[in-house]
Image (cartoon, rainbow, N blue to C red):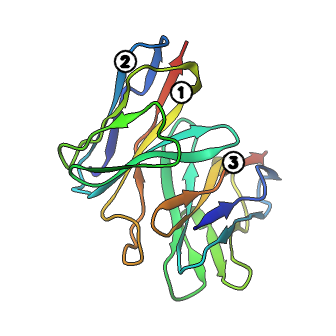
C-alpha cells in the first residue's frame, strides 16, 4: 500500500525568502509523484509531477521538486516566494489509486 | 474549455433531507472520483469510477452513493445527510485510471461546500 506524509501542516515565510515543503511517501512499488496547489476557494491544480527520468522536476510558478528514492522523499522548493503563493499544497502519489497527504498551508508574509 | 463542473457550489441543508451533488467533465475521461476535504485530514476518497457502470468504494464511503450511467457524469448522492457529512467536496477526473501505465494527473472541480444542520 502507498501513503504520503507531509511533515509540516503550516509554513509561514516572508516574501522573497526561499521555502521548502516536505513530502515523504511509502510504497512497495514504483510510483508517480505529484504536487497540487489549492488557492483559496478553488479546486486543486497540478503544480508538477515526477514520472521518470531526471529527479529534479520543474513546475509552474517557479516551483521545483526533487525525487529522492533512497529517502523516499519528494520535497517542493521555491527560491523566492511571492504573496500570491499563499495557498494549500498537497503531495500525492499514485499506485493503484491516488493518495494525498494532509496538506501544508503556506502563508507568505509581506 | 476543459473542465470539471460541480453543482451546487454551496449548500446548507438539514439532517435527513436527500441531496445530490452533480459532477460533469467534458474531457472524455474514463476515471472519476469524489473526495471530501476536512481540516487536518486532507483529501479522503469517497467513491471512484473506472468507467461507465463501474464504481467502487474509497476510504470513506459510508453515507454516500454514486452512479456512473454516462461517461461524463458522476453524481454524489447523500440519501440521509448527517452533520458529520458537513465538508468540502471535490469531484475529479483523469484520462485513465491510476496504475503502472497511467501517467496522467487528476483534474478537479472547484468544490462544493456542504453544511448539514
Chain letter for mark 3: A
Question: What SS does tag 3 mark?
Answer: helix
Q: Position of residue B13 (x, y in %)?
A: 46, 13
- Tell whether B65 sits left or right of A17: left
Question: For the residues marked 2 and 3, what is the alpha-carbon distance in whole angstroms?
Answer: 41 Å
Question: Which residue sits at x=65%, y=51%?
Answer: A85
Mark in the foreground, 3 or 1:
1
* Quadrant into which the C terminus of chain A falls: top right
Q: Do the residues at discs 1 and 2 belong to one chain?
A: yes
Crowd rating for badge 1 (residues with CA inside 10 Å; few <14, some 14–19, many 20+): many
Which of the 4 quarters of the picture holds residue B97? Answer: bottom left
What is the chain letter for disc 1? B
Residue topped by disc 2: B18
Look at mark 3 in the image and give the residue it sits on: A83
Q: Residue at x 45, y 23 (%)?
A: B10
**What is the distance, in whole Å, between disc 3 and disc 1 at their CAs?**
33 Å
In the picture, measured across the screen, residue A48 lies left or right of residue A84, that is: left
Q: Residue at x 66, y 50 (%)?
A: A102
Labels 2 and 3 within one chain: no
Q: State the residue position of label 1.
A: B85
Is residue B86 found left or right of B93 in the rendered image? right
Taking the view exactly as shown, the residue that stands out farthest to the bottom is: A53
Amino acid at each position: 500500500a502507498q501513503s504520503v506524509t507531509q511533515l509540516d501542516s503550516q509554513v509561514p515565510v516572508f516574501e522573497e525568502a526561499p521555502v521548502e515543503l516536505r513530502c515523504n511517501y511509502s510504497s512497495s512499488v514504483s510510483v508517480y509523484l505529484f504536487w497540487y496547489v489549492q488557492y483559496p476557494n478553488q479546486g486543486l491544480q497540478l503544480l508538477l509531477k515526477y514520472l521518470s527520468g531526471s529527479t529534479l522536476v520543474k513546475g509552474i510558478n517557479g516551483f521545483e521538486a526533487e525525487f529522492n528514492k533512497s529517502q523516499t522523499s519528494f520535497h517542493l522548493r521555491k527560491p523566492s516566494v511571492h504573496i500570491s503563493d499563499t495557498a494549500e499544497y498537497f503531495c500525492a502519489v499514485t499506485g493503484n489509486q491516488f493518495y494525498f497527504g494532509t496538506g501544508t498551508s503556506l502563508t507568505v508574509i509581506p | 474549455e476543459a473542465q470539471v463542473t460541480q453543482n451546487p457550489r454551496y449548500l446548507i441543508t438539514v439532517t435527513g433531507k436527500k441531496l445530490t451533488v452533480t459532477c460533469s467533465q467534458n474531457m472524455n475521461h474514463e476515471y472519476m472520483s469524489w473526495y471530501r476535504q476536512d481540516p487536518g485530514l486532507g483529501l479522503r476518497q469517497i467513491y471512484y469510477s473506472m468507467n461507465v457502470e463501474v464504481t467502487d468504494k474509497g476510504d470513506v464511503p459510508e453515507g454516500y452513493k454514486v452512479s456512473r450511467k454516462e461517461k461524463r457524469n458522476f453524481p454524489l448522492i447523500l440519501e440521509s445527510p448527517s452533520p458529520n457529512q458537513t465538508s468540502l467536496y471535490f469531484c475529479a477526473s483523469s484520462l485513465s485510471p491510476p496504475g503502472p501505465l497511467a501517467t496522467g494527473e487528476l483534474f478537479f472541480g472547484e468544490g462544493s461546500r456542504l453544511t448539514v444542520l
